[in-house]
Each structure stands twice: as structure tokens, then as C-alpha cells.
Image: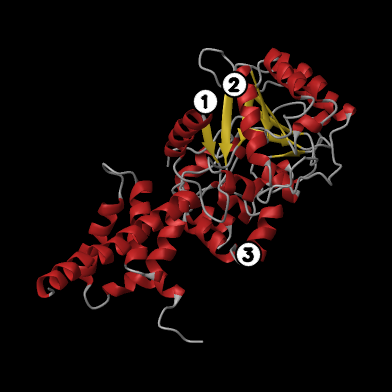
Amino acid sequence: MTFEQTLEQHKLALVRSATTTLQVNVGRLCNLACRHCHLEAGPHRDELMDAETVEEVIACAERLDFATIDITGGAPELLPHLPRLISGLRPHTPRLLIRTNLTALAGNKSEQLINLYRDNKLTIVASLPSINSAQTEAQRGNGVWESAIATLKLLNEAGFGVEGSGLKLDIAANPSGAFLPASQAETEQRFRRELERRYGISFSSLFSFVNVPLGRFHRWLESSGNLPDYLKNLKTRFNPCSVQGLMCRSTLSVDWQGYLYDCDFNQAVGLHHSGTAHHISQLQQLPQPGVRIPTQDHCFACTAGAGFTCTGSIDA
Amino acid sequence: METYYNPADLNRFPEIGKDAPQLAAKFFDYYGAVFAEGALSEREKALIALAVAHAVQCPYCIDAYTRSCLEKGSNLEEMTEAVHVTNAIRGGASLVHGMQMRNIAEKISM
């Protein structure tokens, strides 16, 4: 049964609600090539948002009202126009988020970038799949653990994730394999306890995400013989209560070329917002609630168990 | 090659209720209650189950509780330690019976 058929069976339809979030994907270039990456980002990719599109994104944020703007990639740190993107967006939204794989924030530009994030009061969402180094490196590559821990310490030193500083550092955790994430609350508790105990690291909140069977993760599922069971597991755990809180209902996702989607996963498979290619420069008003969201079977990843929102799982 | 153990049989476990549905219902209700969050977390219970699965050497249980442990957030380091607990208890249980051997040997020896 397809995702659409499953929705119909539960007398549900996936339609937009009020749009509150703009997610800006600046491109596929990344210093890592994680095995779960639905966009197949990596060092060999050269798709990056150009200066003109950066200005078009900023202009859109100026004319429309977004409660949250979320900068993602690839590795946003590798975008040469990142300082302009951040300073241009900052006045136009109360909440500006930036995603990081932590390792791209290490190195000689580290201090400069962290200062940029601090001066603009960005919320940092850092990827860390596990408190176990082997699991982390199995997903993200050799050497990632030490670099990620060192960057988390630097972020804490700058005030991110430290209570009372007003600077948020959230952790995004994806399972390192063909299984669903553990309870978000319990995972947060364990990460908090272990990162503090072992490294003296603190953070604000943790969000658990399901791995979406697209891109490099799909290929790994296929080559490891896990694909049929994983897809079956996602379908079996379809939770109709999750549909109402799905991130695609309130998010507009823009790609490195300026084209619009309902989420980063639809972006990965070229499923445009409202079914046709619209450019952000042409967007004069926010999408109307009720507009249908195009789906494919990868959407089962967002409705399995507790569900998937732009800020983590929701209660079933 | 046909074997006594078929991985597909794990998902067919509920069929054990055929011909004795009331007993199966009681068992599965109890089973569900045992693994629910209580004084121990679901993650801790899954780790105990994994250790016991190795003690009873049940391939179905090892399959099920390896997956369950990962889904509940345990990692291979913790799961491997759990299996060492199995091993320590099994090995220790053999070794401590050596006391019986010693007692008997001492009793009948000069």
C-alpha cells in the first residue's frame, strides 16, 4: 500500500497548514559523506547557492513573515556567502537556526564562524547520532567523533548550550543503522548525562530523527539487504496521529537554486511545492492552508511511531 | 538448506495462539506488561532480555532483542557488555559447582 493509499485508508489528507518556517538548503557540498544522507551531500558535490539566490532568499524573508528560518545543507559553513546570508536574514525573523555537522565548524575558520553565530544569536542544531564513538563514526566517517566533541566544547565556551546564556545549542540524533530512534526524552536524558559526565559538555535540547530511505541511505539499505525490512517497519509503524504535526505542513524548503519544496526530503527527489517548479523570487505570499502536499513512499519515515517535525518528534 | 530455525517464524509467533487462544492471550498480555516501562526503563529491560536470550541461546530472542536494544538507544558497547554478563554468570555457575567436586573429592580422599 502506498503512502497516499494509507492516508486515504485513515481518511486523512496531507495538506498545508499556516506556513511559519523557511528552510534554506544552501547546497550539496559537505566535508562529510554520511551514510544516512538523503541528499548524498559530500566533498565531491559542487552545488552551492550563488550570491544572487542568497539575495533572493533574503528579499523573500523581508517581504514575508517567517517565525523561523532554518539554514541547512550540505555543510552551510562551506558556503562563501554564509556571512551575508546570516546578516541579511537576521533582522527578518525572530528565530534563526543553523545546522552543523560540527566537523565543518572545526578548523581555521572555527573562531570566525562561532563569533558570527554568537553575534547574530543563532540557534545551532548540531548532528550527533550517538554517545558512542563507533556508532557515530560508522554513520559519519572516521575521525568525526573527536572533532565533534572538540567543537561542542568550543561552542560551550562561546556560551552555546550553556544555561542562562540565551544561546541555544540543540542536538539532532539519527539512528546509526536500519532501525528507528529511541524515545526522544530518554535519549536526551542519556546524552545529557553522558556528555556532561565524560566531557563536561552541555546542550539545550535533543531531537531524534528517523533516517529517510532516500539517497545514500537508500543505497546502503539496498546493498546491506535491509531495505525490505526497513520499509516494512516504517509502514507497520504508521501513526495517523503524527500527520497533523508533520513539518512539511508548516515549512517551505528552498534549494540552492531557489526552487521551492514542502520539505528537504521532497527536495531530494525533486517533488516541488504545489507540484510545479516555483522560484523563491516569485513568491509574493505564503502558501494558503489546505494546499495539497505531494507525497511519495519516503513519507512513511515521517509518520512512523512518534512522527517527525522540523524540531523533532511529537507525542503520538 | 532447510533448518529447524527459520527467521520468518519469529513474526509468526502469535500463531502459537492457535488451538490454545486463551493461554496465548494470557501469555502475550503478561509479556507486554513485563516489557513496559516500570521501575526499570524499556531500554534496561531490553538489555536484560538480550543477556537472557544468550543464556538460553534462543536465536529468535537474540534477533528480536538485538533490534530492540538498538531501537531503544543502546549501543554495541553496552550490548557486548550485557553478553559478557551472560558469559560471566554461565561460566561462574559452572565453576562454582567445582565446590561440589571439591567437597566430594575431599570427603572420599585420604
How far apart are the two marked residues, 2 and 3, measured between alpha carbons? 38 Å
Sequence order check, earlier mark of 2 and 3:
2
Q: At which x and y percent is residue A194?
A: 47, 34
Quarter of the rendering containing residue A159? top right
- Please give left or right for residue B94 compared with residue A210 in the image: left
> Disc 2, disc 1: CB below 8 Å?
yes
Q: At which x and y percent is residue A211?
A: 59, 49
Colour mode? secondary structure
Give the foreground label among 3 and 1.
1
- Identify residue type, mark 3: Ser
Identify the chain of the residue marked 2, using the numbered disc in the image: A
Q: At which x and y percent is residue A3?
A: 57, 55
Q: Name the residue under label 2.
A: A156
- Please give left or right for residue A306 compared with residue A297 in the image: left
Identify the chain of the residue marked 1, using the numbered disc in the image: A
Give the vertical position of A134 relative to A128 (above or below): below
Q: Mark 3 points at which residue?
A: A224
Q: Mark 1 points at which residue?
A: A200
How far apart are the two marked residues, 2 and 1, measured between alpha carbons? 9 Å
**Of all residues shown, which one is farthest toward the front?**
B110
Residue A59 visible here? no
> Disc 2, disc 3: CB below 8 Å?
no
Mark 2 packing: few (<14 Cα in 10 Å), some, or many (20+)? many
Give the vertical position of B90 relative to A13 (above or below): below
> Disc 3, disc 1: CB below 8 Å?
no
Give the vertical position of B61 relative to A50 (above or below): below
